[in-house]
Structure formats: structure tokens, C-alpha cells
Image (cartoon, grey):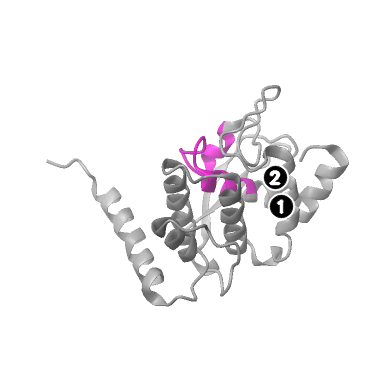
Amino acid sequence: MSDTGPLAVSVTGLYFAWFGVHYWRDTKTHIATDPIKAVLTGKPIPTTSKGKPPSASIKTGLTDSSSSSSSSGASITVPSGAAMTAYIALGAKMHSSGTDTPDNNKALAQQMMGTFDTSWNGQFPDLDKLWTQESSWKTTIENQSSGAYGIPQSLPGDKMAAAGADWKTNPATQILWGLSYIKKTYQSPAKAWAHEQSNNWY
């Protein structure tokens, strides 16, 4: 007899319902859907984001109340909702299939950033330079001196648990937390990169 609870069933059903609608709707859907299609068909994740991101599905979600190196203990609110749930599922599949390479992580972050905050349009190059310098876009990289971990180099790494329990291995979980941290602390990737250039940390 299965011990799957009603909550797990309902969450799984919600995700597949959302996925089904967006997967078959049309070939011009690029936010969230195209990366999923790419992984399922063994193709590279698209690096362009066309169409309108499903920002209406995003709502206030988990909160990380632990202090960060530059936020003076301010809490970090991590968005949730159907779009982010799909990204997290994609990130888990990427890691399990060994496709969470730096290039794929970067492409995933570009897609997620377009969904996360549309006012950041045009600032992906700043995010790219920031996280290239911090981690080279590697999911499981750890700074042996400080203990900072993952793509956004969270210090300590377990702060990313605010975005998901799989923070050690899921690039999407790490990216989601990193974007949330940037928004809370610097308001934008451009400002975060400027701080990095001036101080060699962010």
C-alpha cells in the first residue's frame, strides 16, 4: 500500500497540470517551458527568453531569516509558485542527469531571471560576470577558506535551504536563492556587480 499523502499527490498533480498546459499550448512559449522541453529531448537549454514571463503565478514564499555577509540580518523572501516549482524540478533533473554544467546553469539562470523580475531586463551580463567571478557557475563548488557554497557562493551554504532542501545539488534552487539575495540586498544584478568590483565580494 502506498504511503503517498494527499499533499504530495495534489502538489504533483498541480505541477503536471501546469506543465501540460504550457508544454502543448504553442511552440512560442519560452519561459519555463522551453528549458523543460530541452532537457526532456536532450537538447541544450535555450539562452533566449521570448514572450511574457508568468509573473502572475509568483507569490511570496519561503523566508531565510539568517543573516548574510552584507544584509545585516535582514530576511530574504524567496518567490514560489508554478513557474518556480517548474524550474526547481528542472534543476533537479539537470543534476541527476549530469547536465548541470556551467553553460547550462548559466542558461537556466537567464531564463529564471526573466521570470523573477522583469525590471532586470538587460542585466544578465552583470549577473553572468558576478557569478562567473564567484563560482564559475559550478553547482557544488565550495570555497575552502570561507565555506561559501554553490553558484551564488552563499555563506554559509545552508542559507540556501530557504529556497529548497536540495540546495547542495540543485542549480535552480541555488539560483533562486541567489536572485532573492541580490534583490533584497542590492536591488539589482547591476548594483551587486558594482559592489563586487569595488569590494571583491557581494
| Residue 21 in the image, given as x and y percentages of width and height | 36, 71
Quick check: 198 left or right of 22?
right
For the point 48% across and 61% down, the residue is 83
Q: In this view, does 27 lie above or below 81?
A: below
**Extreme residue toward the left, this view:** 1
For residue 182, say whether it is visible.
yes
For the point 65% across and 67% down, the residue is 118
Q: Residue 131 carries which label?
A: 2
For the point 66% across and 30% down, the residue is 148
Going by the numbered disc 2, the residue's amino acid type is Trp
Which image quadrant is residue 55 in?
bottom right
Q: Nearer the viewer, residue 33 or 167?
A: 33
| Residue 194 in the image, given as x and y percentages of width and height | 83, 49
Residue bounds of the magenta highlight: 158-178
Q: Which mark is residue 127?
A: 1
Going by the numbered disc 1, the residue's amino acid type is Leu
